[in-house]
Amino acid sequence: MMQPGTCLICGRTTETNYEPCSECAKHYEGDIFFLETRRVPSYPNQPVATIGYFANTQASANRYPTGNWRVVEEEKVRKLYSVESMEQIAKDRIVLTEPKTYRILFQPECRRAI
């Protein structure tokens, strides 16, 4: 279970919720993080995700990370999104996804795009 204030990769304490620590961010520099999120918390008082692409849109209202995540090379991500969307994704470096989208992208039996 992903806890706020913890690096989503290595588990070190971070200053923000649901982001990689500075060491992991440096290691994966140039890549895009995908976080699976859902509309209900995984545990009591779980903070809402306020980072990444879709985080500050109506589509992402009340998004709670599930603990599932992947890191994808930016060039592969560019094949999935419009130029306009990619501008923001490249800036944010994190994409919040619905469970269904996450499964389509990352589960071997469902993998379509990446």
Image: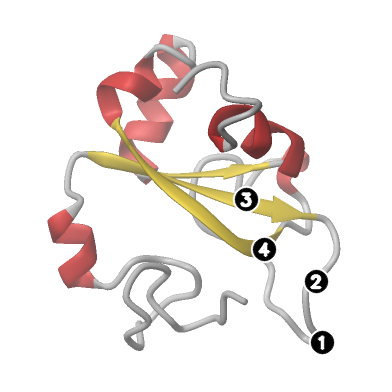
Q: Which residue is mark 2?
A: 41
Q: N-terminal of the two: label 1 or label 3?
A: 3
Q: Are circles 1 and 3 on residues that touch, CB within 8 Å?
A: no
* Earlier-in-chain disc, 1 versus 4: 1
Say the numbered circle drawn on residue 31. none
Image spot of residue 109 (x, y percent): 64, 28
User: Which residue bears the numbered disc 4?
Assistant: 66
Q: For the point 77% across and 54% down, which residue is it? A: 38
Circle 1/circle 2 CB separation < 8 Å:
yes
Secondary structure type for disc 1: loop
State the residue at coordinates (19%, 39%).
30
Task: Estimate the spatial distance between the alpha carbons at disc 1 and disc 3, rounded to whole Å.
Answer: 18 Å
Check disc 3 and report its element: helix, strand or loop. Answer: strand
- Asked whether, in this view, residue 43 is left or right of residue 94, the answer is right
Q: Which residue is mark 3?
A: 36
Considering only order in the chain, which callout, 4 or 2, is on the residue closer to the N terminus? 2
CB-based contact (under 8 Å), mark 3 and mark 4: yes
Spatial CA distance of label 1 from label 2 is 7 Å
Q: Residue at x 36, y 17 (%)?
A: 78
First-in-chain label (2 vs 3): 3
* Residue position for label 1: 44
Instruction: Give the SS element for disc 2.
Output: loop
